[in-house]
Image (cartoon, helix red, strand yellow):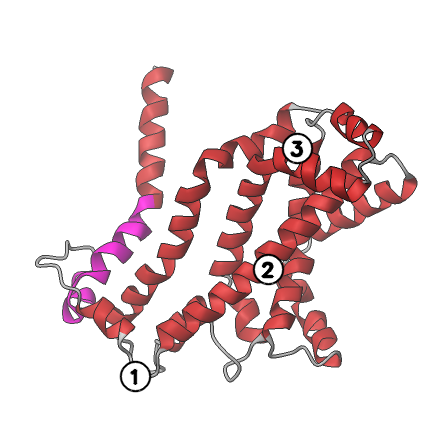
């Protein structure tokens, strides 16, 4: 009985999560006039008009949004990966009191929703003239998401034999060289997991870019979809076309790193 119910439950759950994907995919290739009356119908016949209208908008909304999202996501993920890996390595190898204090501080950061700290963050950014700038949004992303990366890397570092670092130290390598040439290449699964999580979270973020960047200083793919919806009417063909195109970069990122994804999540849970 259990052997029958488990596949059935997995199938139902998978279908439940596939419904939004189907709606976006179907309506992205459906004529705009047919979306509102029949949102769940198949796109028969399929059309590329929605995608063409998005890519050729006079205000270049998609291209501007795509460029800003690529810049913010790339910079944030790069800085987050470097800081998380180095700090995670330090916390995994140290037994000092300051290391335990830092762990508690980072753990506290994981429990605070971003909406709670958004107002004080905007005040800090405004005090340093970083409000409505890409640098301010990148700093916010780094400060908020670094605790997650630290704990993923710290858990994985515990599975790396410390003897490798000791051997490198005997050969004359310093801490910095030992980490980047010996330890970090062994953290590829954890790095892939963090890159996927960071990339998806930052790419899909809506509220923080809307508040920090503001409507006059740039837009990302998520806020671009919001701008495509008018106050009294919405071009659903454009909206679904934007949604479809906005998901492609994240999908490519996941497919490129999927081999290391699960291994990076489970490595720290089974070692150390």
Pointer 2 local density, CA inside 10 Å: few below 14, some 14–19, many at least 20: many
- In the rendered image of this protein, does residue 97 appear above or below residue 249? above
Q: Quadrant of the C terminus?
A: top right
- Residue placed furthest toward the right: 97
Image coordinates of residue 126 in percent, x first then y, are 70, 80
Residue position marked by numbered label 3 in the rendering: 156
- For marks 3 and 1, the one nearer the N-term is 1
Pointer 1 local density, CA inside 10 Å: few below 14, some 14–19, many at least 20: few
Q: Residue at x 37, y 61 (%)?
A: 246
Q: Residue at x 31, y 27 (%)?
A: 8
- In the rendered image of this protein, does residue 267 appear above or below residue 111? above
Residue position marked by numbered label 1 in the rendering: 58
Q: Residue at x 12, y 59 (%)?
A: 46
Q: Quadrant of the N terminus?
A: top left
Image coordinates of residue 7 in percent, x first then y, are 33, 25
Which type of secondary structure does the marked residue at label 1 adopt? loop
Q: Is residue 59 magenta?
A: no
- Magenta-colored span: 18-39
Image coordinates of residue 86 in percent, x first then y, are 73, 45
Residue position marked by numbered label 2 in the rendering: 76
């Amino acid at each position: 009985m259990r052997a029958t119910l488990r596949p059935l439950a997995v199938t139902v759950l998978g279908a439940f999560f596939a419904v939004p994907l189907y709606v976006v995919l179907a309506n992205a290739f459906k004529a705009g006039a047919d979306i509102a009356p029949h949102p769940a119908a198949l796109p028969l016949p399929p059309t590329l008009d929605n995608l063409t209208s998005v890519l050729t908008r006079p205000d270049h909304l998609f291209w501007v949004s795509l460029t800003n999202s690529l810049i913010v996501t790339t910079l944030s993920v790069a800085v987050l990966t470097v800081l998380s890996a180095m700090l995670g390595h330090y916390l995994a190898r140290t037994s000092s009191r300051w290391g335990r204090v830092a762990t508690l501080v980072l753990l506290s950061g994981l429990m605070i929703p971003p909406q709670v700290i958004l107002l004080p963050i905007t005040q800090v950014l405004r005090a340093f003239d970083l409000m409505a700038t890409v640098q301010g949004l990148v700093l916010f992303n780094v400060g908020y998401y670094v605790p997650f990366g630290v704990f993923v890397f710290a858990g994985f570092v515990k599975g790396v034999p410390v003897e490798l670092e000791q051997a490198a130290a005997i050969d004359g390598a310093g801490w910095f060289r030992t980490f980047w040439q010996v330890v970090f290449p062994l953290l590829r699964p954890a790095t892939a997991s963090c890159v996927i999580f960071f990339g998806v979270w930052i790419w899909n973020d809506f509220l923080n870019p809307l508040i920090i960047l503001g409507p006059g200083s740039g837009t990302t793919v998520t806020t671009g979809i919001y701008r495509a919806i008018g106050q009294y009417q919405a071009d659903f063909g454009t909206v679904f076309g934007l949604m479809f195109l906005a998901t492609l970069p994240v999908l490519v990122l996941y497919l490129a790193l999927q081999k290391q994804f699960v291994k990076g999540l489970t490595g720290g849970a089974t070692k150390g």
